Amino acid sequence: MDLGPGRRSAPPRFVLRGVSEKNREGKRTARERLAVEREKQKSAEKRRRGLIVGASVVGVLGLAAVIGVVAANADKEDRSDAAGPVVAPSGALGKDGTAIPVGKQDAKATLTVWEDFRCPACKVFEQEYSPTIHELTEAGQLKVEYHLVTLIDGGMGGTGSRNAANAAACAQDAGHFADYHDVLFRNQPMESDDAFADNGKLIELAGKVDGLDTPAFRSCVEDGKHNGWVAKSHEAFMKGGFNGTPTVLFDGRNIYQDRSMTPEKFKQMVQQADKG
């Protein structure tokens, strides 16, 4: 409509309402998308803690498969002869005498753990589960059998896995395996850093365990007293057909097949077994 010189008609109201409605709709859609995204993040966070160990293991399984082949070849080539005599640590159990026991042996539930002290996924497992494992072993409800392997040495080179395993066996001789085992994982170097090949470093870490750093322990570490036993333990791991470390068996069942496994769920399983 022409309202005369210098005057223009206002835009039709329905046009303004249309723009306003579109703006409101756009804002509402944006808010809805944000709300959905927040819910997704909350759900992801709830799942994260339960799956962190399993996810970490899955991340290394492909590498572990390759490492296993390399390690197997290394075993055939030079490990059996170069490791020296097989001297099992005090109290070693199992079919091949390769298991270091922790906890009361009359406990009804058994956890079998195959670990490599250079293995990052093993450290993740220990961070997540060791408080629960300690609680259950101290309560007499669980016994743990630790088997030490040298998978990372075989795949990346070096001797840190073997030397750390030997030192842990020396700690078992001194009655301090569990504490030293935890110290090694808390102070684990990067996977590519073969720091545990240095016996001086392993002896230094023994200072973190009361009563462990003794002349007998130092001699055991420096002489590689249990190197042959470590090689035998690794050989048993390879013959067992396991896919990688950590391999964690609860009463013979690989609990890593259950991606929903959590420390709390594991605790309930152990307590149920304890009740018979």
Image (cartoon, rainbow, N blue to C red):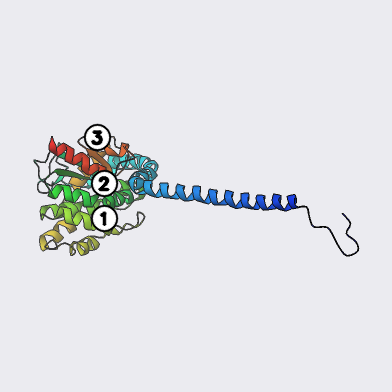
N-term-proximal mark, 1 vs 2: 1
* Residue 97 rendering spot, x and y as whole percentages: 14, 41
Q: What residue type is labelled 3?
A: Arg
Residue designated by label 2? 263
- Residue 1 lies left or right of residue 162; in this view the side is right
Which of the two residues, 4 or 131, is positioned nearer the viewer here?
4
Say which of 193 and 37 sits in front: 37
Q: Type of residue at label 1?
A: Phe
On residue 253, which mark appears? Answer: 3
The kind of secondary structure element at disc 2 is helix
Q: Which residue is drawn at 70% across and 49% down?
A: 18
- The answer to whether residue 71 shows anywhere in this view is yes
Residue at the extreme right of the image, as rendered: 5
Q: Which mark is residue 185?
A: 1
Q: In which quarter of the image is the N terminus?
A: bottom right
How far separated are the C-alphas under marks 1 and 2? 18 Å
